[in-house]
Image (cartoon, rainbow, N blue to C red):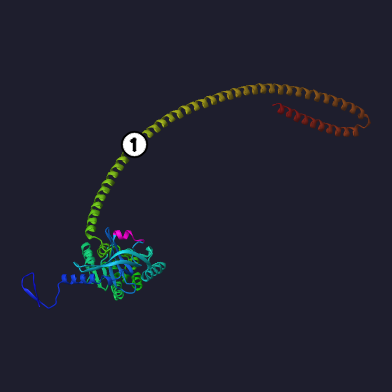
Amino acid sequence: MANVDQPGGGDVDLPDGTWSVAELNEEITTILEASNDRLPTYVVGEVSDVSHYDFGTFFDLRDLDGEALISCLAWSYAIDGFDHDLEAGTSAVVQASVEYHAEKGNMQLMVSDYWPLGESARVQELEALRAALDEEGLLDADRKREVPAYPRTVGVVTSLSGSAREDVCSAIHDRAPGVDVKLCGATVQGENAVSSVIGAVEHLDRDPTVDVLIVTRGGGADADLWCFNAEPLVRRLGDCRTPVVAAIGHEDDRTLADDVADERCMTPTDAGVNAVPDMAVVRRGIGDLERRIDDAYRGFVDGRLEELDRRVATAHESLQQTVATQRAERRGQLQRASALEARIHGAYASLVADRLDGLEQRLDGALRDLEHAAETEAVTARAARGRVADLEARIDGAYETRVERELASLETRIESAYREREADARVAAGTAEARRLRVVVAVLLAVLVIGGVVVAALLLGLV
């Protein structure tokens, strides 16, 4: 048994043959140096987890047929001599030597040259699956949903033992203490990882209270993250009812689960930050918004009141101007009406005077015409009466003369006839003569009557 001093004092008995870590590492170094000729110069495998730095590049070389890994380092001067870029997912042959660091117990290949053989079968399968998912539209940006701005419950699928759980929960509770976190543990690497993650996702996706689902794990080698490229898991994430946030590995890591998720984050902490709002910022924003609303309201009210005051003052001034204008217009209208009335009165008086003068002139002319006509009629009447008197005298003279002449002639004829017939037949002749005399007397009387009528007609025509 060997004795070992403890830091707090006292000795502890150890089994025989117990080595210290330093002794073990030195022995490993001695064995490797002694067996250097047994180690290969060239190693074939798949390049993964490439990390570039100024001094060199770290990467893993994975067995083409299994899960075995070995760490590699190529200094920057060696990389400058490579004919091809060092890319993850490439099957390659490296020229290297085995180096063991006794201080930390690390062993790695120091790569001096690199020849790519082409993409590995696993990478080819991944690209074929990516193309199929893209053709189906599962990778389209249009199908991605918005993560709720203010979720009440966040579901988290991750390893219960990893730091990712603490990171995502701390980020959520620091930003939004009132948000409920439902954690569903899952195996996030190894053979059972796919079924474990799918089961946890299905459990939380069926929960109606979960508003957003986070699937996350910390960083690791490509082989550790490869389960998140498995087709069943990727398709299950694409079919989720709940919006999905994926945060697999670190910033340089990219899986199909990240591509099919509604939102991709670089780290678990980023996932928690993006899943919930910063309530302190929200509260400050609400306070600022309330102040801005109050200021805007006061400004709006003051502005409206000032505007109303200006409008009232303007309306009052406009009304006063309108009233003054209307009064001036009314005075002008009254003045125009008075002038028009005076003009109408003058025109009416002038018209009446003209009409009266004309009427008076016409009446004077008519009176003169009537007087002239009366004088003419009187003269004419006197002349007519003179003519009528003269005619009467002439008719009377002519009548008398004719009657006398006719009577004288008749008397003569009667006397002649009487004397002629007196002898032949005094009795018969006397009778016949008497009848003739009666006839003659009747005729004479008729002639006298006709003559009187003619004279009367002539007199009436002259009058």
Choose top left, top right, bottom left or bottom right for residue 116.
bottom left
Outermost residue to the right: 424
Quick one: 38 or 416, which is closer to the camera?
Answer: 38
Quadrant holding the C terminus: top right
Number of dots carrying numbers: 1
Q: Which residue type carries mark 1?
A: Gln
Q: At numbered mark 1, what does the secondary structure look like: helix, strand or loop?
A: helix
Most foreground residue, 129 or 4: 4
Q: Does the magenta stretch mainly form a helix, a strand or a loop?
A: helix
Q: Is residue 81 magenta?
A: yes
Q: Is residue 439 visible?
A: yes
- Horizontal placement of 175 versus 388: left or right? left
Where residue 152 appears, x then y in whole percent?
A: 25, 66
Residue drawn 74% across and 23% down?
Answer: 391
Q: Position of residue 53 (x, y in %)?
A: 27, 59
Can residue 147 be seen in the rendering of this structure?
Answer: no
Residue indicated by mark 1: 321
The residue stretch that appears in magenta? 76-83
State the residue in front, 153 or 379. Answer: 153
Q: Is-magenta flag for residue 386?
A: no
Does residue 238 lie above or below 287 as drawn? below
Residue 364 pos. (x, y %): 56, 23
Residue at far left of view: 10
Is the residue marked by circle 1 packed among few (<14), some (14-19), or many (20+) residues within 10 Å? few
